[in-house]
Amino acid sequence: MSDSLSGLAALGSLWRRRRVLGAVAAAVLGLAVLALIVLPVRYLATASVIVAEQEPGAAASMSPAWAQKVGDPADLESQLLVIRSPRLLRLVMSAPGVIPAVVKECERGRWIGGGVSCDKLATDPSAFIDHVDNRFSVASAGRSRVINISYQSSLPETAQTLANALTQVFLDDQRNEGANSREVASSWIWQELKQLDQQLRAADEKIQQFRRTKGLMRGANAPISSERLTSIGQQLSQAEAARAEAAARLQEIKSEQERGPTDAPSVLASRTIADLKQQLTAVSAQLASAATMLGPKHPSILSLSREQAMVQQRLVDEMQNIAASAKKAYDANDALVNSLKRQMDGAKAEAGSATLDEASIESMVRDTEIKRQQYAELYKKASELETERRVLRGSTRLVSLAELPNKPFFPKKIPFLAAGATLALIFGVGAALLADRVAPPASGEAAPAVPEPVQPPAREVAEIAQGPALAPEEAARVPDPSAADAQRPDLPEIAGVPILACLPRLKSLRQLSAVGAILQDYRNLAIPQALRLASEDAEFQAGIRTLVRELAIRESGQTRRIVVTSPESGEGKTTIVCALAEHLAAAGRRVLIVECEPLHPNVAQVLSLPPGPGLIGVLSGATAVTDAVTRTEHPNLDVLPLGQGTVPTADLLFGAKFAELLSGFEAYDVVLIDSVLPAPNSQYLSGMDWAVLCVRNDRPVIEPVVSAISRIKALGAGHVGVVVTMTEAERACPPQATFIATDAYARAG
């Protein structure tokens, strides 16, 4: 409405068109009530877990790693991605009671009006994931570390079962991940303990064998060689003392023999000598007594004299025996001392050798003790890991399981009716004001005092309605519908470039009913999902066949080099390249995809290719072309991905070396190049057979497309064509359509 309307004038218009306002508002409100009745009821069940909890058995103080994990939002985002991962959804499929609940939910959806087949949900993991993926909702609760896992379903039991199943699977996965790491560490430690035990046994056996070989047996307090050396030393000391004593006695006896043997201490110590001296004294006394009374010739005197001489002779003989005994004792002790000295020398040599052997043994024993200490520490660590593995709870714990929902999550009556009433009022007011503006006021009603809107001249209105007057050179490029090519009579042109084909929008068939399809949030499909849907879409395949015909790919005998590009990202360029390559490969053509998209390289991920050097490695000279080209599951389709490494410069990626590389792919029938548009300072497209520009059907303005066509021509392209993507069935490339040039927008205001 015009800004010149005042508030009173607007109220007057509403009052005059109150019937229109009431009818439109009632219709919109009736549609809201009908939608409230018709829309399927959805229930929401929510379970909660908390992440980044410190594990039991850890130190009382939280480690810096745990502190960073708790405060890092990236860890929480990572956990959200893990919960939504296809791996966990496959594990959910095997949870008890999940398959019957999902099949029952699917059957109810088919009863309501959906067209999804429920038979393969129990056996096909991909179909199961496609069915439940959008129904799961995983989000963090505010700024906390609590994650809410929700599931929407038309059956409350199914919502509760699926939410609890995913929660339990996530908790078990986190617990098993921590337990597996500890189990691996424990297994390695037990293996090391087994090896250490064998080494300790071998070392002990080696030490004992060395002792037996070297004779290094131990006695009561020391090695036998040391104890033997000590014993010989003690015996030698005793023998030397005995020899010295015998030598002293012998010397004493010899010296006393010159003065008189009876005065020697060793002689006096003899009992025999003492008895003989006493007997001699008694005989001498008798002889002296008898001599006083008898004469020298008296027989008694003679008998006593003979007895005295015999006692003296016996005394002399006993003295000689004592001297001979002392001599023998000295000789025996001297021989013993000499023998012990020889034994002492041998024992010293043996003890010296044993000392070196004992040093070697001590080194071996020290190494063995180190290993034994290591064995004890590893055994303690293995026991701790085994204990932690058995009592491990994981860093994630359950907050609450999902309860059975009693109230519908969607639609809620009061908010739904309030929104319907608001929309009814808005549409009613708009319809009333529009009706009052279009139709003149009835007789008897005063027209609102508003200024007349300024009308443009009739000539300008006609120019805007019919399109701008084009220059002669621009008019020459506009195709004449009557003289169009017979192969594409219904396709227009953009800035003098023909539209080769129109490809329809690919839509997922996962909605449950017609109403669900209307309310479905059409997000951009992932490229693998788009390719799968494209292979099943007959209209899309017809568009691909039209594109193949327009590009004259069916003509054999030469390699067709086709560059597929787009003015901006998200135009469907990579999807068109992959779909066209699969179509040509299925038709028996040898196809090579070359990825020249440094900003958004998706070909390797879409076709599930292993990482490699790719085009970057070839252009930099790090690898050969044959090593960089990757074969796919289809025998006729090969791929040269961009590869891993630094982002190449424009001179390297779009220079002469790349053109020389393309000339070497003569073995292929078609070379499809997924490329961006470089700066127009080279002849990058001069050697290409076709340059195909992908354009979305729903883009708001055509200016970037016209600019991209100019850049393509500046790069030396000879044949340029446009492929319109994401067209709707009722508006797909209408006949006689012309796009307004860029300057027409300025002239039209």
Image: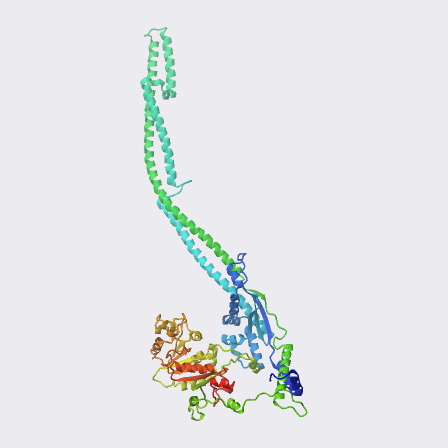
Q: Residue furthest bottom?
A: 482
Q: Residue furthest right?
A: 444
At x 33%, y 38%, the residue is 346
Against 160, residue 56 (above or below) is: above
Image location of residue 734, percent across then percent down: 49, 88
Indicate left or right for 238 with 168 as reference. left
Indicate left or right for 576 with 102 as reference. left
Q: Is residue 581 visible?
A: no
Image location of residue 253, percent across then percent down: 33, 21
Quarter of the picture holding the N terminus: bottom right
Residue in the foreground of this view, choosing between 139 and 703: 703
Residue in the foreground of this view, choosing between 117 and 738: 738
Q: Which colour scheme appears in the figure?
A: rainbow
Against 338, residue 364 (above or below) is: below
Image location of residue 654, percent across then percent down: 38, 76
At x 33%, y 37%, the residue is 345
Against 452, residue 570 (above or below) is: above
Count of numbered labels shown in the rendering: 0
Image location of residue 681, percent across then percent down: 38, 78
Quadrant of residue 250 in the image?
Answer: top left
Residue in the foreground of this view, choosing between 113 and 338: 113
Q: Is residue 161 visible?
A: yes
